[in-house]
Amino acid sequence: MTHPSSNIYQCLQACPCGVLILDQAGKINWLNPALEAMLALKSDQLVGQSRERFPFTTHRGLFKSSGLMHLFGPGVEQERWLLCTVDEQNQLDPSIHTIKYFQDVTEQVQLSDENQRLKKQVEELAITDELTGLANRQALTRALNAQVARSRRYQNPLSLAVISLVDKKNDEQLPNEVILAISRYLRDRLRWVDLIARWDHNQFITILPETTLQDCSELMDKVLAEFTDLSWPDQFEPGNLGLQFGLAEWHKGQDARLLMKQAFASLNEGETGANPS
């Protein structure tokens, strides 16, 4: 009569996934040809080995619990990722205590990594905010650096305005419809030479070339003066919505970072122009 354990070996011999059997002492007792190919090692190099004296440091993941096993380093012909599942055996044969199954998921992991890399590239190349269509942070930073360099070279005036939409009665995040409404409002009231970008959920930054701090302040006063006439989305109660401004003018010796810092400091110290309705 055939011993049950011999039937297990026969079934696993031709298994397309890698199979490793550990005995009760935690030593490698057997592996199938598929796992030999994945590891680029022969059975006689591994059988009898234990975690404590395992000679292949790059393959120590064979003794770990289930999950991803990363093969890399000296002696590894090709970087591989193996997904391991574990089956604990409750039978009398001490030579078959743990059966581990390995699936080669190298291609899937590499594709996932490549997708993440491409996604990051796209995000870095994108210059518009997804919701409003305004310039995003990356576009603002590039444009501000260019404008500061131009002012440094030609000594032209340059101002920066940070604009925050605030609600004194409600601390919750403003709906996207409201952000869209204020973004259109600001875009329609600024000059074509001005660059407006969405910096945060309810915060916008405008670069104003050829503009002194006094001219910038007057322009923001006009923006605020018409704010009470803004039409809000249906079913939205404007409450105590208001605009808060932080203004800064470029001075010799400043870079884009310092100009931004000055504008945000002005914003924190400023007052809010509120909607009285």
Image (cartoon, rainbow, N blue to C red):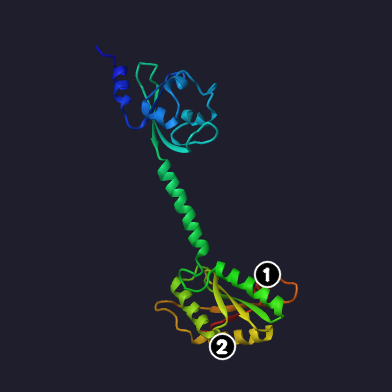
Q: What residue is shown at x 56% (from left), y 88% (from top)?
A: 225
Is 213 left or right of 176, judged from the image as shown?
A: right
Q: Where residue 146 appears, x then y in whole percent?
A: 63, 73
Q: Where residue 60 appears, x then y in whole percent?
A: 51, 29
Q: What residue is shown at x 54% (from left), y 35% (from top)?
A: 73
- Name the disc covering residue 225, or none: 2
Q: Which of 68 and 170 is in front in this view?
A: 68
- The residue labelled by disc 1 is 261
Three-letter amino acid code of the residue under disc 1: Lys
Q: Residue 259 occupies which quadrant of the picture?
A: bottom right
Please identify the quadrant where the N terminus is shown.
top left
Q: What residue is shown at x 44% (from left), y 30% (from top)?
A: 39
Is 247 left or right of 18, judged from the image as shown?
A: right
- State whether residue 91 is above or below residue 85: above
Q: Where residue 139 appears, x then y in whole percent?
A: 55, 70
- State whether residue 255 is above or below residue 110: below
The secondary structure type at the circle numbered 1 is helix
